Amino acid sequence: MPGVVVIAILFLADLKNESHYFKHITDVLGAPVTVLAFAVMAFAIGLFLDDIRNLAEEFAGRFLPKYTINWNFIWKFSKENLQRLEDYYFTYYVFDFNMACALLVSILAVQFLPIFPQHLPCWVLIIIGIATFVFALDCHFLRKEIIKLSHHPPESKNETT
């Protein structure tokens, strides 16, 4: 999903260009191949955003011990608690981080790459800025909960193996 957001924002910014680079791609490749190419690009961009998150995790682990997730909890949690952590915290943490990153990368690309001579209107930047802030803030709070749970795993209730 975050990769699609990046492509969508770049596409919207391209609509303001006189050159319409995305239209040229469609003209050269044809619509079906262009859709496939954009799907592959969205997937690759999503993986790149995951890599940024992984590097941020590594950075936090090495230089900010207070903000380190103790990943050994994976081996200590019951299957039920791991599923609960994934369902209520980790999935949304990853999504929020990747969305905040996608929005930030998109805006920086549109504002500073020379292929987008027309910048997005101020009101669009404000909306995207607010969305980025909300995603980043939620990511921060979810990460704090994951850190707390990783250092103090909950007790299992009547777990049977």
Image (spheres, rainbow, N blue to C red):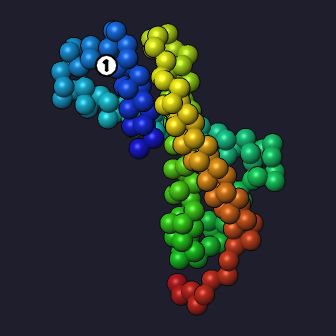
Quarter of the image for residue 38 reads: top left
User: x, y (%) of residue 114?
Assistant: 49, 10
Residue 44 sits in which quadrant?
top left
Which residue type carries mark 1? Phe
- Tell me residue 50's x, y (percent): 53, 42
Quadrant for the N terminus, please: top left
Question: Residue at position x 60%, y 87% from top?
Answer: 157
| Residue 100 at x, y percent in the picture | 56, 41
Q: Position of residue 105 (x, y in %)?
A: 54, 29
Farthest residue, direction bottom = 158
Front-lying residue, 12 or 6: 12
Q: Number of callouts in the render?
A: 1
Residue toward you, 126 or 85:
126
Q: Which residue is mark 1?
A: 22
Instruction: State left or right for residue 34 relative to residue 103.
Output: left
Residue at (32, 35) in percent of width and height: 39
Q: Is residue 89 left or right of residue 41?
A: right
Residue at 37 percent across and 13 percent down: it is: 17
